[in-house]
């Protein structure tokens, strides 16, 4: 079990979900994806899931307070106490403060932030292709552009906070999956977060 506490950040279509799973498997830590946790709770009909479903059904975004509650609960579970990889949280500056507060209350902090850098046109192309493959008609170019604009406006600024702490590793998100994974692993090794004997 590794004690790496990581965050992966990138626009929609950057491949962070796929890379996140690869990193987590390699390090033996869980991926904590807010989207997945929400979906599991909605599917399971838990009280939290019912609250989330009502918000999403109304077409609203899940508020920061509820998202923070979900993440704190997940990070308090045994498998995430020693290490984790966050995907989808924090996604704005308010959530960065919440996460800082929670981690410091446990004497923890993030070890590294992996930024998957993908040009906007590439993101749009990838998401459009994925939508066609999965038959998702809701992923129109307009919807995609709007999501990317939200990312640029709200999520990209969190990287400045983490850059100031010297923990951001910028990874070129264009290339083959294996090339990108290799870049990420090299960056983690340079920080001493991944033993060179790791498979």
Image (tube, rainbow, N blue to C red):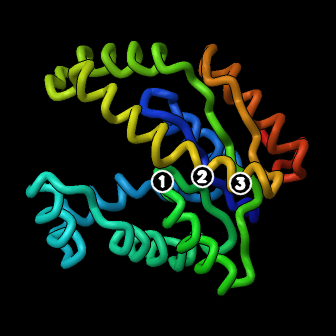
Q: Name the side, left or right, on which 196 lies relative to 48.
A: right
- Mark closest to the chain's N terminus, 1 or 2: 1
Q: Quadrant of residue 116?
A: top right
- How far apart are the two marked residues, 1 and 2, measured between alpha carbons? 7 Å
How crowded pointer 2 is (Cα within 10 Å; few <14, some 14-19, many 20+) is rated as some
Res. 158 mark:
2
Mark 1: which secondary structure? loop
Q: Which mark is residue 186?
A: none
Q: Residue at x 48, y 53 (%)?
A: 91
Rendered location of residue 4, percent (x, y): 74, 60
Q: Above or below — where is 45 with respect to 24?
A: below
Q: What kind of element bears circle 3?
A: helix
Looking at the image, which residue is at 75% across and 49% down? 163
The secondary structure type at the circle numbered 2 is: helix
Relative height, residue 112 to residue 62 (above, below)? above
Residue identifier under label 1:
91
The residue singled out by tag 3 in the image is 162
Q: CA–CA distance between discs 3 and 1?
A: 13 Å
- Circles 3 and 2 in contact, beta carbons < 8 Å: yes
């Amino acid at each position: 079990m590794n004690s790496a506490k990581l965050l992966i950040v990138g626009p929609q279509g950057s491949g962070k979900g796929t890379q996140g799973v690869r990193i987590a498997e390699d390090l033996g830590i869980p991926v904590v994806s807010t989207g997945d946790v929400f979906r599991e709770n909605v599917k399971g009909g838990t009280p939290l899931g019912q609250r989330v479903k009502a918000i999403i059904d109304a077409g609203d975004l899940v508020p920061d307070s509820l998202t923070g509650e979900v993440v704190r609960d997940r990070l308090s579970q045994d498998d995430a106490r020693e290490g984790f990889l966050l995907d989808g949280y924090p996604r704005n500056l308010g959530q960065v403060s919440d996460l800082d507060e929670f981690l410091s209350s446990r004497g923890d902090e993030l070890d590294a932030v992996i930024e998957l850098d993908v040009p906007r046109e590439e993101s749009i192309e990838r998401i459009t292709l994925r939508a066609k493959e999965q038959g998702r008609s809701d992923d129109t170019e307009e919807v995609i552009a709007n999501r990317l604009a939200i990312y640029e406006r709200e999520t990209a600024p969190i990287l400045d906070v983490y850059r100031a702490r010297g923990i951001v590793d910028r990874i070129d998100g264009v290339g083959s999956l294996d090339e990108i994974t290799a870049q990420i692993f090299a960056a983690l090794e340079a920080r001493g977060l991944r033993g060179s004997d790791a498979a």
